[in-house]
Image (spheres, rainbow, N blue to C red):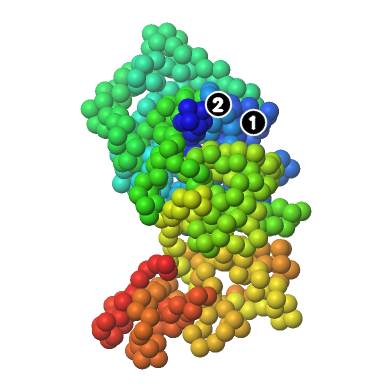
């Protein structure tokens, strides 16, 4: 038991979030560098270079330079066992990000210091706030000309509605970047450009007086003014508020030149939590006291073309996992044996013999798992809270170019839907011959098209539909034919046969409600 507690308490499981190009991949690689997981962290994912980021594997991601799906990396640092969950860098995939956040105990937001919170990331970061887990901010690229620091913080507070607490403070930026001032120790970590960060950075720490020779004229006075202002204006560090996700500790650095990465890592690991008790139907499940349990938060088919298989990602929530153990798949009510579980290092996999609460493992999925499913010991049946489905905001009719490939088409589209990347609907009166696809972000249409073609050899055409609003009909007894809607309304059903309504205009929802007393609508398909 003592060993189990030790193992679980050293776990730190977090998601890393940013807008494309802010430096998430670079920062992740630098973390791995400190953990010794990779030997050489180069600047990665250059469109022209052959070397791609470890966590960036899917072809479409390489082509477009954005992350479409998330992957998981594990490394050890300073007696901690760290699980990083990478997330898609575009808000069109914010639902995937939300699912990943369900498996994380905290989140790290990477922001480009020259850009602040960008429009296309707002939604992603808001999703992060919705989860109420600790959020840490790393303001990156300080070696480039950055926005005014106060403005940056203001931006985060306004856009995300959470308070910020800078743990350190930058001195200059771009060519004048000299390092960061640590507010607790009142010392300066001096910036050095460590061979573009191909090895661990050196951390030179000086007192303010000692740093005088390093700083440019006027920088010390400016720093003193800014710190005075900051002490008066910003929120004080409060671990309780951090734990609730209401206060974000902020750090500054430059991932590319490997500056500020280890400072961040050290503080972060102390401020973030080990796996905490999770809510299940029977109450809170303690990660140490309870037997093994976990839930599926992500399903991904064809991760590796050579394998052609489907992997279900499980977050272990309590106890110890051992390869080959027999467990209960709660939603199916069946006992299954978890053989050949895997740990993912992007497309490299290794078989895990044991894992602990906080860890993420990949399970071969012969098609039995759904997102949100609980797995636990048969003698102690529990069920974790489900993962909500976001209401799609874009709809298109899907047509196959070659109608002979019907079987592959149906298989492909169903599998991709099971992953949660798209939602499939049908005309209310017909079967699978007319398929309507709903997505949260339009880029998901591109992914669907690409994947059907690439993985299932099926070419499709998408005809965009004008609908933007969807509601599930809660009262099943209602006769759909009798619902009198607006002229922009469409009746459809989902794969489980549940009736839904689509509208072009948001005000039509209210009008439909008015015209059909007793009609109960829901934004989530539960
Ligand atoms: P992402 O995963 O968030 O999309 O960002 P990624 O790490 O791929 O970084 C995007 C670009 O920003 C990369 O340049 C990377 O080298 C650069 N970058 C990351 N961190 C820093 C930093 O601290 N300072 C500076 N100046 N640049 C940084 P690229 O031109 O797209 O790729 P490459 O040609 O350098 O490989």
- In which quadrant is the C terminus drawn? bottom left
Q: CA distance from mark 2 to mark 1?
A: 10 Å
**Mark 2 residue element:** strand
Badge 1 density bin: few <14, some 14–19, many ≥20, Cα 10 Å: some
Name the side, left or right, on which 137 lies relative to 361: left
**In the displayed image of the protein, which residue is found farthest to the top?**
210
Disc count in the image? 2
**In the displayed image of the protein, which residue is found farthest to the left?**
232
Residue visible at 39% across and 25% down in the picture: 168
Residue designated by label 2: 77
In the depicted view, which residue is nearer to us: 78 or 443?
78
Residue visible at 40% across and 74% down in the picture: 472
Q: Is mark 2 within 8 Å of ligand 1?
A: no
Q: Earlier in the sequence, mark 2 or mark 1?
A: 1
Residue 22 drawn above or below residue 407: above
Answer yes or no: is residue 88 visible.
no
Q: Position of residue 54 (x, y in %)?
A: 65, 40
Q: Residue 367 falls in which quadrant of the image?
A: bottom right
Residue 310 drawn above or below residue 217: below
**Mark 1 residue element:** loop
In the depicted view, which residue is nearer to us: 37 or 362?
362
- Mark on residue 37? 1
């Amino acid at each position: 038991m003592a060993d189990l507690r030790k193992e679980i308490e050293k776990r730190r499981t977090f998601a890393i979030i940013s807008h494309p190009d802010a430096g998430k991949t670079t920062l992740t690689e630098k973390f791995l560098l400190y953990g010794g997981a990779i030997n050489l962290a180069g600047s990665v994912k250059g469109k022209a270079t052959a070397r791609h980021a470890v966590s960036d594997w899917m072809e479409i991601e390489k082509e477009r330079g954005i992350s479409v799906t998330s992957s998981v990396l594990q490394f050890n640092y300073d007696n901690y066992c760290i699980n990083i969950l990478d997330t898609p860098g575009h808000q069109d995939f914010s639902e995937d990000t939300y699912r990943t956040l369900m498996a994380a105990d905290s989140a790290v937001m990477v922001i480009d210091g020259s850009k602040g919170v960008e429009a296309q990331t707002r939604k992603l970061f808001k999703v992060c706030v919705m989860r109420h887990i600790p959020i840490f901010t790393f303001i990156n690229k300080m070696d480039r000309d950055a926005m005014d620091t106060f403005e940056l913080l203001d931006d985060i507070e306004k856009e995300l509605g959470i308070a910020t607490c800078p743990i350190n403070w930058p001195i200059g930026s771009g060519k004048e970047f000299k390092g960061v001032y640590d507010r607790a120790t009142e010392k300066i970590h001096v910036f050095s450009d460590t061979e573009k960060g191909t090895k661990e950075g050196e951390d030179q720490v000086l007192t303010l007086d000692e740093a005088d020779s390093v700083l440019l004229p006027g920088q010390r006075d400016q720093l003193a003014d800014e710190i005075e202002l900051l002490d008066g204006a910003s929120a004080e560090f409060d671990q309780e508020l951090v734990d609730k996700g209401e206060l974000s500790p902020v750090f500054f650095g430059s991932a590319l030149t490997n500056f500020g990465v280890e400072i961040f890592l050290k503080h972060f690991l102390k401020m973030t939590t080990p796996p905490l008790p999770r809510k299940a139907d029977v109450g809170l499940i303690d990660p140490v006291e309870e037997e093994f349990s976990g839930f599926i938060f992500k399903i991904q088919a064809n991760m590796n073309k050579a394998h052609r298989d489907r992997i279900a990602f499980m977050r272990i929530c309590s106890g110890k996992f051992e390869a080959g153990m027999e467990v209960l798949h709660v939603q199916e009510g069946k006992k299954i044996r978890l053989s050949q579980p895997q740990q993912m290092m992007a497309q490299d996999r290794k078989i895990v013999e044991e894992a602990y609460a906080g860890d993420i493992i990949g399970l071969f999925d012969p098609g039995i798992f759904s997102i949100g499913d609980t797995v636990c010991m048969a003698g102690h049946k529990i069920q974790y809270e489900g993962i909500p489905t976001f209401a799609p905001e874009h709809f298109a009719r899907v047509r196959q170019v070659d109608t002979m490939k019907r079987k592959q088409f149906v298989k492909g589209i169903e599998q991709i839907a099971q992953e949660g990347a798209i939602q499939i609907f049908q005309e209310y009166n017909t079967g699978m011959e007319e398929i309507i696809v709903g997505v949260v972000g339009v880029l998901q249409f591109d992914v669907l098209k690409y994947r059907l073609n690439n993985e299932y050899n099926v070419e499709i055409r998408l005809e965009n539909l004008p609908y933007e609003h969807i509601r599930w009909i809660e009262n099943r007894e209602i006769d759909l034919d009798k619902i009198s809607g607006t002229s922009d309304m469409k009746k459809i059903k989902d794969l489980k046969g549940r009736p839904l309504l689509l509208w072009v205009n948001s005000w039509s929802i209210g009008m439909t409600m008015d015209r059909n007393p007793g009609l109960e609508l829901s934004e989530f398909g539960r």
